[in-house]
Image (tube, rainbow, N blue to C red):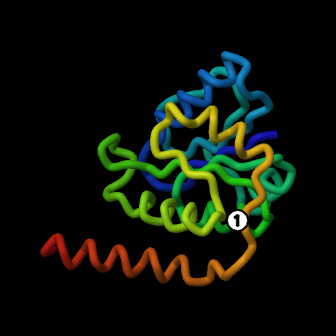
Amino acid sequence: MIFVTVGTHDRQFDRLLKELDILVERGKIKNVVAQIGHSNYIPKNYKWFRFLEFEKMFKLQRKSDFIISHGGVGSIMNALQLNKPIVVVPRLPEYKEHLDHHQVFTTKELEKRGRIIAVYDLKNLAKALEKARGFKPKQKGSDSRIPEIVENYLSKLEANSNV
């Protein structure tokens, strides 16, 4: 089973859900279960729900072969805690999915460390999903600094925006 999470952010992540629907329809992937949050797009070819209690979500993640996630630190850390292969598609402000590019920053940092498979362009999603089947996230090092790295990045953004 492939578990998908777009988190609890109050914006949609329709482009990811649509691309997954296309891949399922074409037979490229199957057995997908998605948490779609506040997205407007309703999947046609796979199971979905908007939100679920943490314990139930964690149980689905544990049962999954791998996880597809937005670039939210909480969702990524859950997958890493379970030592699951994870494909991360960061939300982008140009699609009105988020306010800034901090998910791209987090994704690039974890990709550099060999912890995730990153997808910055959805044309590459199918290839990333193939790679996920044999991917083993690196366990070397500690992820305890990731929230600190994200916080530092957001502080720099704030300082540069003259808010």
The percent coordinates of residue 78 (x first, y second) are 70, 65
What residue did someone put label 1 on? 78
For the residue pair 11 and 111, the one nearer the viewer reads as 111
Image: 70 above or below 124: below
Label 1: element kind = helix
Image: 100 above or below 24: below
Amino acid found under the numbered disc labelled 1: Asn
The percent coordinates of residue 138 (x first, y second) are 72, 67
Q: Residue at x 75, y 69 (%)?
A: 81
- The quadrant of the rendering that contains the N terminus is top right
The percent coordinates of residue 5 (x first, y second) are 63, 49
The percent coordinates of residue 48 (x first, y second) are 68, 36
Instruction: Determine which quarter of the picture holds residue 29.
Output: top right
Image: 150 above or below 34: below
Q: Residue at x 72, y 77 (%)?
A: 140
Question: Is residue 76 shown left or right of residue 109?
Answer: right
Q: Residue at x 48, y 51 (%)?
A: 90
For the residue pair 128 and 97, the one nearer the viewer reads as 128
For the residue pair 125 and 18, the one nearer the viewer reads as 125
